[in-house]
Image (cartoon, helix red, strand yellow):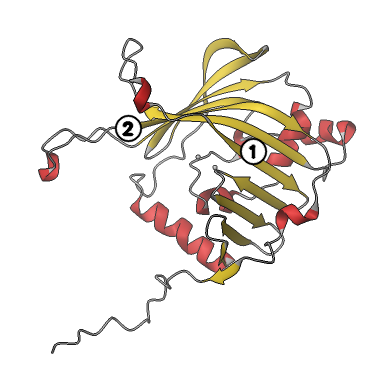
């Protein structure tokens, strides 16, 4: 879904304490990617807009990607906590397993070892979004393309950037958000558009249906620097613990067939 929010940190000291709280809400839509501006998806193909909320408090970050799934990252311990809200279940991922997940994603990524890291590239185009002037940037990842509209004069933008850059990049990698590191951005991105996946022509690999890339657009709808309760970063008492299969244990015994 993880940017040089630079020496703007110095400005953030003037605006608010570095460890102040942050809530940022995005309105997100998902639809099949169009090949050209004239091609528009049918209304039934466009998912209704949903909210994604990011909260930051001190060393902890929380992402509510949907009502069903919440991810909490503890920057002090390095642990990632996934809350499956509809099942009232919690899955904890240790720092070691987070690194293993990131390594696995990199291994199966189309980005070959030794290739240059993708960079944000300015297009020179400007656009006003929700009343704020933005500058357009592109970012081509190994398996997705992205476009960002960055608002250099967004209110309290330096403070918001300072908070977002405190979230360690391992969190974005393990959560598979496909976001560039926030420290690479020269300002606050208030709109992000990603095209994930590649076109798979019909009949390729024996498939009868063609694969189609997905376009995800997220726009900032609310930013708050108000205090956030500590309880937002803890596991609810009525949630039950469950464990992921230990797919990273190379010494695990293989399953034995009951029939010799």
Please say if 81 is above or below 147.
below
Location of residue 85 by image quarter: bottom right
Are circles 1 and 2 on residues that touch, CB within 8 Å? Answer: no
**Looking at the picture, how far across and down is residue 95, in whole percent?**
58, 65
Q: Nearer the viewer, residue 254 or 23?
A: 23
Q: Residue at x 73, y 52 (%)?
A: 232
Q: Secondary structure at mark 2?
A: loop
Q: Quadrant of the C terminus?
A: bottom left
Can you tell which mark lies on residue 213? 2
Q: CA distance from mark 1 to mark 2?
A: 27 Å
Q: Is residue 115 visible?
A: yes
**What residue is pinned by disc 1?**
183
Q: Let me know if residue 165 appears in the view.
A: no
Q: With 194 as the anchor, is 85 left or right in this view?
A: right
104 or 71, which is in the foreground? 71
What element does badge 1 sit on? helix
Q: Position of residue 118 (x, y in %)?
A: 46, 36
Please give left or right for residue 15 compared with residue 208 in the image: right
Q: Mark 1 or mark 2: name the one nearer the start of the chain.
A: 1
Q: Position of residue 203 (x, y in %)?
A: 10, 37
Residue 229: x percent and y percent?
Answer: 80, 50
Residue 14 horizontal side relative to residue 234, left or right: right
Q: What residue is drawn where x is 53% and y is 22%?
A: 137
Crowd rating for badge 2 (residues with CA inside 10 Å; few <14, some 14–19, many 20+): some
Res 153 label: none
Depicted 195 relative to depicted 113: above or below: above
């Amino acid at each position: 879904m993880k940017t040089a929010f630079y020496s703007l940190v110095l400005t953030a000291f003037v605006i608010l304490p570095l460890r102040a709280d942050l809530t940022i809400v995005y309105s997100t839509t998902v639809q099949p990617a169009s090949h050209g501006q004239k091609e528009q998806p049918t209304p039934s193909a466009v998912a209704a807009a949903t909210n994604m909320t990011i909260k930051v408090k001190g060393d902890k970050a929380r992402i509510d990607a949907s009502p069903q799934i919440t991810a909490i990252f503890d920057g002090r311990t390095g642990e990632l906590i996934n809350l499956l809200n509809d099942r009232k279940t919690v899955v904890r991922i240790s720092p070691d397993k987070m690194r293993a997940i990131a390594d696995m994603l990199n291994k199966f990524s189309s980005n070959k070892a030794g290739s240059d890291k993708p960079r944000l590239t300015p297009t020179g185009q400007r656009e006003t979004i929700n009343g704020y002037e933005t500058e357009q940037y592109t970012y081509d990842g190994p398996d997705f393309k992205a476009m960002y509209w960055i608002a250099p004069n967004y209110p309290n933008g330096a403070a918001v950037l300072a908070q977002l850059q405190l979230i360690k990049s391992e969190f974005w990698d393990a959560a598979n958000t496909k976001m560039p590191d926030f420290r690479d951005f020269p300002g606050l991105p208030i709109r992000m558009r990603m095209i994930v996946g590649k076109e798979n022509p019909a009949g390729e690999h024996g498939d009868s249906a063609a694969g189609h890339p997905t376009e995800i657009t997220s726009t900032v709808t609310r930013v708050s620097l108000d205090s956030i309760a500590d309880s937002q970063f803890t596991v609810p008492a009525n949630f039950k613990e469950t464990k992921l299969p230990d797919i990273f244990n190379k010494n695990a015994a293989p399953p034995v067939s009951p029939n010799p």
